[in-house]
Amino acid sequence: MSLFPKGIPVGKRFLDLVLTIPGLILFSPVIGMLALLIRIRMGAPVIFTQRRPGYLSRPFNMYKFRTMDERHDEQGRLLPDGERLTGLGRFMRANSLDELPELLNVLRGEMSLVGPRPLLMRYLERYTPEQARRHDVLPGITGWAQVNGRNALTWEDKFRLDLWYVDHWTLLLDIKILFLTLWKVIRREGISQPGFATAPEFMGTDAEGDSEG
């Protein structure tokens, strides 16, 4: 990957590098300890890798710490997320520690510290043209939606906030979001929707509208 990817504001990329490189050094003991605990308690792999759409919907491999085990039911099917989420995984999610490996994605220029969260590849065909504009910027570890509700928001609210960020981006806004993120992590706000271990799947705007009555 390019040190300064084409189409990405130089100031934004510079901020990412200035914070990410020292961050990786500072958090390296924590990253090492978490990796060891995951290996002992959940086994391999330690890192959860998944293909996600990035800038201009280009796919990349996103890295996170594994938070779920591989338990199956009697028919050999994976149990629901809520049943596979381990105590260690729940702790990491509550403190956003599972996101630490994404600093490598930022270093590689595939993500930014701030931007719309990279979602699943299969969502691409479900977006409206307006919603798809969230890929006009680099995806981020945190973002405007995350500091305004995170997983406690509906999909429509998340996309509305993502697009506001796309249309109003400034370097000062990124800095503001980073400070707000720190505050949210300390208070552990908006980790998941009530009744869900993770956010429910996005089925498309029409499907979401139907489900909400």
Image (cartoon, rainbow, N blue to C red):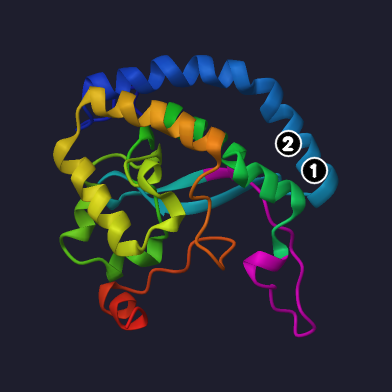
Residue 210 visible, this orientation:
yes
- Label 2 sits on a secondary structure element that is helix
Over which residues does the magenta segment extend? 63-83
Where residue 89 appears, as percent x and y from the top left, is: 69, 49
- The residue at the point 69 percent across, 26 percent down is 30
Residue 69: in magenta span: yes
Residue 81: in magenta span: yes
Q: Which residue is mark 2?
A: 35
- The residue at the point 47 percent across, 68 percent down is 200
Quarter of the image for the N terminus: give it. top left
In the image, taking residue 139 as reference, residue 206 lies left or right, namely left
Q: Residues within 10 Å of mark 1 (few under 14, many from 20)?
A: some
Q: Residues within 10 Å of mark 2 (few under 14, many from 20)?
A: some
Q: Residue furthest front?
A: 187
Where residue 135 appears, as percent x and y from the top left, is: 25, 49
In the image, taking residue 120 as reference, residue 68 lies left or right, namely right
- The residue at the point 40 percent across, 55 percent down is 119
- The residue at the point 22 percent across, 59 percent down is 131
Question: In the rendered view, would you say 17 is above or below 111?
Answer: above
Q: Which residue is mark 1?
A: 39
Q: Quadrant of residue 143?
A: top left
Whether residues under marks 1 and 2 lie with C-beta atoms below 8 angstroms apart, the answer is yes
